[in-house]
Image (cartoon, helix red, strand yellow):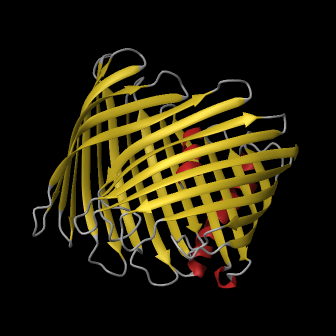
Amino acid sequence: MKFSTKNTVLKINVTILFLILFLTPPLFSDVRTQFVPTVSITEEYTDNYNQTQNNKDDEFSTIYSAGFSFGVIDKNWDVFLNYNPAYTDYDTHDEDDNWSHYAFLQGQYQAAEHTSFTLSQSFVRNVEEHDYFTTIAGVIHEFGQRDNIGMNYSYSFDKYDDENADENKTHNPSAFLSYWFTPQYGLDLGGGYEKTDYDLSGEDDSETWSGDIKFLKAMNRHLDIYAAYEQTETQQDSGDQSTYYPSIGFDWQPTEDSQISIGAGVLFQEWDNENDDSKEAFFLNLDMYKDYNFSRRGVFSITGSSGYDPNSSDAASLGFHIYYQAGCLLSYKLTKRLTAEFDAAYAIDQYDDPEVDRQDNTFDFGAGLVWSPLKWLSLNLSYGFTDFDTDDNTRDDYQENVGSLTITMTPSQPVRFGSSNPRADLENRLFN
């Protein structure tokens, strides 16, 4: 996709919001709008710019960013747009100076008391001159206290300025149903189809059908136990693949800001190739999140999850992906305007395709101080450490230390549009 096409995508989104802003207020008196600009400057230092095990190369860089958020909200619908371009200027690696772009558009419409539609679009252009665009549309209808049915459809593509084997387009429709026959017994059903086309090779194109069923029994208002079964079938030129996962476990939600789901079972993997590469292994399905407000000044958040994906999005050749990840964040107000933060994360990524058979281990640690001398001004001094270890012969293990100072200027009280998701924000910070 050329830059003109990317501009077209952004222009369409901005035009839609421009029309909403200037055409809806006369028609709907309750419509609220807000425009919030943001400017930031970051000075950053790394002691391992190329992320290599030996011959480390340090580097300074300055990042200039000027973006905005814009929202329109009404009784039954809202639309929100965020756009943040940034320019990175390197001290010695001038050839890597670049622009990056992040744009996100989301909308929600409450069509009826129990039926809602959602639509979101995101566009990211990163320092590798790599574009990623995704659109997600969904509908959900609630017909009971814990009963709902819904459908989603997503479309995404990866594109590089220079030819790259990872360039692809993906279509993914899916549906789900949650239904409780009685207050004690319920059923969850899910199914989906994913088609991925790789632009260059074509040999890695794949089609995946997936389905899952979960039988639940409510032990009390906070705890359910379950027996579940998941299955995926993938067809691709390099060899078809089947995955079966029976499990038992529990879902526990003791408070509104916490949840723990743990399932255990055997993961069966079968590959249709010349060798007998089929295998089975114990697999722990984990999904947990908890906020601890141990004082009026301090919050400690933890998160953890695991899962598997028949087709890794990291690269066209990596195939089946299993991950385990866990992390935490401690935030403590030292004074009214000064906050200290500490975070740590550990991730295991396994690529079990017989032609790959690779595992990556990543540990991250960070610490920082956030000072807000004025309502519209904040300064963030941060330090980050990464330890990456892999058994892949084509990549280096490495350690990296990064320090940065960011100055941000933004209005003090922007209206928040849409529902906030603290867990998503936390995991984006820890693992991305």
In the image shown, does 368 or 179 lie closer to the viewer? 368
Q: Quadrant of residue 193?
A: bottom left
Q: Residue 51 in the image: x percent, y percent?
A: 55, 70
Residue 114: x, y in percent?
A: 48, 32
| Residue 22 picture location, percent across and down | 75, 56
Taking the image as shown, residue 296 lies to the left or right of residue 322, namely right
Give the residue furthest to the right. 374
Relative side of 177 to 61, left or right: left
Residue 50 shows in the view: yes
Residue lying at the far front of the rendered structure: 54
Q: Is residue 174 left or right of residue 294?
A: left
Residue at image x 80%, y 55%?
Answer: 408
Residue 326, above or below 178:
below
Judging depth in this view, the residue of 202 and 262 nearest the camera is 262
Q: How many marks?
A: 0
112 sits to left or right of 179: right
Residue at 72 percent of width and 71 percent of height: 61
* Residue in the image at 57% along x and 65% along y: 123
Q: Is residue 416 visible?
A: no
Q: Quadrant of residue 142?
A: top left
Would you place residue 391 above or below residue 75 in this image?
below
Quarter of image, res 48: bottom right
Quadrant of the frame with the C terminus: bottom right
Q: Residue at x 69, y 42 (%)?
A: 341
Question: How far across and down, in percent of the image, does residue 205 sit?
Answer: 28, 71
Using the image, determine if residue 16 lies above or below residue 179: below
